Image (spheres, grey):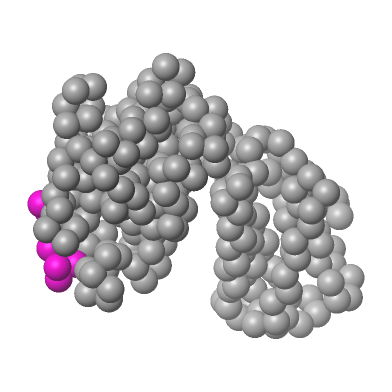
Amino acid sequence: YKRQQLSSEFARSETALAFNAFDTLDFILERDYFYVDAIVINRRTGRSVDLRFPNQRGFGIGGRMAIGFLGGTQHYTKFQIYSWDRKNYGYTVFGDSQSSGTGATSESKSWVYQVFRGDKTKFNNISSPSLGMNHALTSHLPTAIELGSPVISTMGYNNRTADTNTFRQLADSLLQPMRRAGVRIAAIATMVTQSFGGNTLPNTTLINLGNSYGIPVIRIDTAVKSRHLPNDGVHLSDSGHIVFAQEVMKVIGSEIAGLYRNCLLYTSDAADE
């Protein structure tokens, strides 16, 4: 299977999922703004392969996709196409590695997945590892505005060494365009550690920004402890993601409800190949 964006093509093969003639395979392709998940499940053996193709430039809403299987002849007996109305509903999670799921042992253990109960129709997660606010201005901010959904912002860690004025300007340069575009900031999250070499100003700056704009602040810095960052002192463990999810729900849990829908667009006839 491969992904295609404009004139660039990316392909990857996977040999871990062997299958015999007459095996039934389920193929799932999930396309989001910053990644494509390709999942193949062999119904006979129960084995599956899940490949993620990240693209930090983003797919946007354009582009085409092509799917190909190599080896023998395959017959498609039935396929379904689902589409989620991903604009102007639900939430957009806008952050770096903490929100992209780094540190969790599986996607289901990440705080975003827990908050939205694993229902991907309820959120767009446009977070990317190592994403700085300065780079997000051109790479991710336009997508957040285009989606139009309330934003949970967890940005800031990768700019923590900036002086206070620069840090505030960077944070404000993300918030203000969304506000001007009519995108509601549902909440801002502080960063996972209370201080950086004794410097608490980055988190204080985020708190002050939230207060000045009337944006709820999720106090991750006081909730997460060192035991929740066992690997490198930065990235959350599974238990840390639980704490993060709990803090998010304390602040905006009453907003998060089953208000979102998905729509089955097409189901083929059994004779279609």
Query: Where does residue 54 sit, x and y in percent of width and height?
Result: 58, 58
Left or right of residue 273: residue 24: left
Residue 220 visible to the viewer: yes
Give the quadrant of residue 40. Answer: bottom right
Total count of labels: 0
Q: Residue at x 15, y 53 (%)?
A: 199
| Above-or-below relation of 167 to 42 | above
Query: Where does residue 158 sit, x and y in percent of width and height?
Result: 36, 54
Q: Residue at x 81, y 62 (%)?
A: 68
Observer-nearest of 24 and 188: 188
Q: Residue at x 73, y 74 (%)?
A: 13
Q: What segment is highlighted magenta in the picture?
A: 222-228
| Above-or-below relation of 260 to 24 | above
Observer-nearest of 145 and 168: 168
Give the quadrant of residue 129. Answer: bottom left
Query: Where does residue 22 sit, x and y in percent of width and height?
Result: 78, 76
Q: Is residue 216 magenta?
A: no
Left or right of residue 90: residue 43: right
Q: Residue furthest right?
A: 73
Give the quadrant of residue 242. Answer: bottom left
Observer-nearest of 217 and 86: 217
Q: Is residue 225 magenta?
A: yes
Point out the image quarter for the N terminus. bottom right
Point out the image quarter for the C terminus. bottom right
Query: Where does residue 149 sit, x and y in percent of width and height?
Result: 43, 28
| Above-or-below relation of 65 to 53 | above
Which secondary structure is most common in the magenta stretch? Answer: helix
Q: Residue at x 27, y 36 (%)?
A: 165
